[in-house]
Image (cartoon, rainbow, N blue to C red):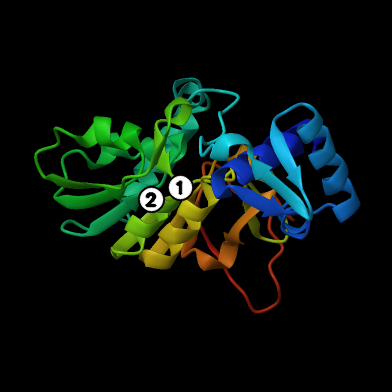
Amino acid sequence: MLSEDRLRGIVAEVRRRGSASVSRLSVDFAVSEATIRRDLDQLAESGTLRRVRGGATAIRGSVRPEADPRPFADVATAASSAKAGIAARAATLVEDGSVVALDIGTSVAALCPQLRDRELTVVTASLAVVQALADAPGIDLVVLGGLLRPSYQSMVGTLTESALRQVRVDVAFLGAAGVRPDGCVLDSTPSEVPVKRGLLDIAGRSYLLVDHEKFPGTGFLEIAPATRFAGIVTDRPLPPGAIDLPEGEELEVLLP
């Protein structure tokens, strides 16, 4: 991971939590504690964070979530045909009358046109999903509150995570930034990872929606092992070695 990406991630994590220790950040970003100390010193010198013994705290207790390098609207138009194919296949996994959780992200939001005419309850923290399904006659929307990330039209933070723990869904659809060959599912947005983990915890079954470019893709924060999902929905057959699971473990890969 580039040092600039790590610095942005550290700032986002400290702001989200209010403070963070050197040891915690070292684990989260998979670097030495000495590297984290240098990063924190640099961020403190620039006035971005306040350095304290053993870690850092946010300036003025800021809880603003990190911004995205590309806004949601721009990302949504990338690989649109692949996302449409993935969405069409994912829609076949949804039974009428079920409770469905839709994650933050463009690949999952592409499911909305496929679900508009269904009879469903949809749980989401994505305002893009809310906008797409608000007038769908057969859909009841459960909108999770929280802290707004304007650039990605999503709700995050402790309020969102708390609301998630109060519901249960039949099926959840999640996105990710990358899937490593060892099956580790990754993301790059610290404020979104706890929401994704929460979705896995409340779902009877979950599916990962990722196009072929996400193997291995990017990301430095682990969401979960791929085996936590009932299956992966993608747009192309996976090449040999894309995922090398431990002996005895299996993972269904679904294609359009």
Tell me the amino acid under the disc marked 1: Gly
Q: Is residue 9 shown above or below 152?
A: below
Relative to the observer, which residue lies in front, 42 or 220?
42
Point 37% across, 65% down: residue: 202
- Pick out the residue farthest to the left: 137
Q: Secondary structure at mark 2?
A: helix
Place of residue 91 in the rendered image (x, y in percent of width and height, measured from the top left): 31, 48
* Residue 99, disc: none
* Residue 160, disc: 2
Q: Quadrant of the C terminus?
A: top left
Place of residue 176 in the rendered image (x, y in percent of width and height, measured from the top left): 55, 46
Point 51% across, 39% down: residue: 63
Q: Quadrant of the N terminus?
A: top right
Query: Image check: 167 left or right of 78?
Result: left
**Does residue 238 show up?**
no
Place of residue 20 in the rendered image (x, y in percent of width and height, measured from the top left): 67, 52
Q: Is residue 107 shown above or below 205?
A: above
**Labels 1 and 2 touching (C-beta < 8 A):** yes
Q: Alpha-carbon distance for marks 1 and 2?
A: 5 Å
Relative to the observer, which residue lies in front, 176 or 7?
7
Q: Secondary structure at mark 1?
A: loop
Place of residue 182 in the rendered image (x, y in percent of width and height, measured from the top left): 72, 61
Tell me the amino acid under the disc marked 2: Thr
Relative to the observer, which residue lies in front, 131 or 21?
21
Q: How many neighbours does mark 1 have within 10 angstroms: few (below 14), some (14-19), or many (20 or more)? A: many
- Pick out the residue farthest to the bottom: 248
